[in-house]
Image (cartoon, rainbow, N blue to C red):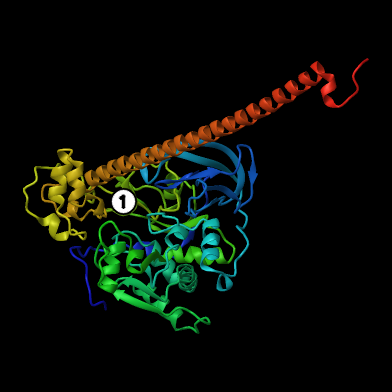
Amino acid sequence: MPAHRFHGGLQLEKHTTGVLARPIQIAAPSVVLALALQQHRGLRLSASVRVGESVAAGQVLARPDLDIGDPRWGAWLHAPCAGEVIGIETRPLIQQPTQSGLHILLRVDGIDSVQAAPFDWQNMTREAVQACLARAGISGLGGANFPSADKLRVAVETLILNGAECEPWIGCDDGLLIEESADVLLGAQILARACGALRIDIALEAHMTRALAALQAALDEVPMPDAVPMRLHRLPSRYPQGGERQLIEVLTGLQVPLGQHPSDIGVLVHNVGTAHATACAAQGRALTHRIVTVTGPGVHAPGNFSVALGTSVADLVAQAGGYTARARRLLIGGPLMGIALPHDDFALQKGSNCVLVLDAVRDLVAEPSHACIRCGDCAEVCPARLSPQLLWQSTQSQRLDQARENGLMACIECGLCDLVCPSHIGLTQSFREEKQALWLADHRARQADDARQRFEQRALRLQREAAALEARRASAGKEALSASVVALAIAKAKARRIARPGEDGGESAP
């Protein structure tokens, strides 16, 4: 048991029994898969295929759209199935339903095996392993979908494998660990190689009893030569312990300073699903499928499904038995940190870990909101040690700079403040929107600053080129003037000889 704990949090009732009652099922892909070219905020992909082109399963569809000199790796995108590219069009993004982005539309005509070249990670440099993971499309499968190779660029001492699945309805990591523990541990070793870690801490919550047993059995097997030491931690079940900063504090007692990253204190966190995808990549399988939990009182047959990326929410729910009469609210993710969807015509992507269909009773925003009574309950449960009521006041009065100073960007959007608020104020959604506004403002400021620097550099370059051209012209003018002076002198000398022919030593006429 850990000697540390994080601030705030709550112990929540779990609802994963039905999901884990049956093995992971293979979901049939949609007839048309829609694969987003915006995999992570701030990083877009550029399509490598054309409309009308036939592609094989595992073929590269898009590569990171990076400028020359950009040190990031990004993560490539591959075809989950064989088929034909029938369009590249704008569609709503499942993680940001109010925004749209380009999607590659792939009409499936075959579900053949997805094979690529395996790589010998044990005999490769850190950078070479990172490049292979980027080309295999490995991204964070815990929900953030950040390109894994970019997280691995900074060398750290400790790699934390995050299996602390704390959202009460999600069980995709739990099911994966029960069935694929050996590959998860193999992937952990590859990730440790890529970031230079000297030890691996694996964290699970106490309610994940079958996963704990499976992992312990895998750890007890004969280890591979030169393996990085691994330790399994059984943590008390407490939400949101699966948050990156909260998990680091529980395992190490260290807090990641605001504005810094875990790598700044020598720690790196990766999801167990990411580790499994990493092991598959080393065996020659790009990331084209992921485990998705389909659950809630609004579906007939909850379970974990292996889903081809780009499959629609509607088709996946249909394979979970379809909607019940109690279905009232559709979420991508858990009930606390999930994103509400207006309909089910969205395509699942790498960061989509759960499709949750709630009824009216469990709809946390169903009751009308009232004025804040300043009870302080939200501050007591906030794992980021913020004062949500102060942030709420700042956002409502549009004082975003003050909200930033009060720590708005440190909010992990866990939803606990919503859960305990007696006034039923939608705090988390407000903070999410204002954080997006601040991020866009910062992004535009960076773009403007980059444009200004490019303009200034271009002006200096043009100024230097103009000066060099003027210098060349001046030098050419001097050379031309010197040549004309010499030519004039020669012409004058010739003229004198013609005027006085005897002076050149020749005979005079009689």
Question: What quarter of the picture does the C terminus occupy?
Answer: top right
- Up/down of 472 relative to 82, above or below: above
Q: Which residue is mark 1?
A: 338
- Up/down of 249 relative to 40, above or below: below
Q: Is residue 481 visible?
A: yes
| Location of residue 364 in the rendering, given as x and y in whole percent from the top left corner | 21, 49
Name the one closer to the observer, 134 or 20.
134
Name the one closer to the observer, 461 or 298.
461
Name the one closer to the observer, 242 or 264.
264
| Location of residue 385 in the rendering, given as x and y in whole percent from the top left corner | 18, 59
- Up/down of 452 relative to 24, above or below: above
| Location of residue 368 in the rendering, given as x and y in whole percent from the top left corner | 15, 41
Q: Secondary structure at mark 1?
A: loop
Identify the image quadrant of residue 177.
bottom left
Identify the image quadrant of residue 295.
bottom left
**Residue found at x 29% / y 67%:** 247
Question: What quarter of the picture does the N terminus occupy?
Answer: bottom left
**On the picture, is 23 further left or further right than 80?**
left
| Location of residue 339 in the rendering, given as x and y in whole percent from the top left corner | 32, 47
Q: Residues within 10 Å of mark 1 (few under 14, many from 20)?
A: many
**Residue found at x 9% / y 42%:** 371
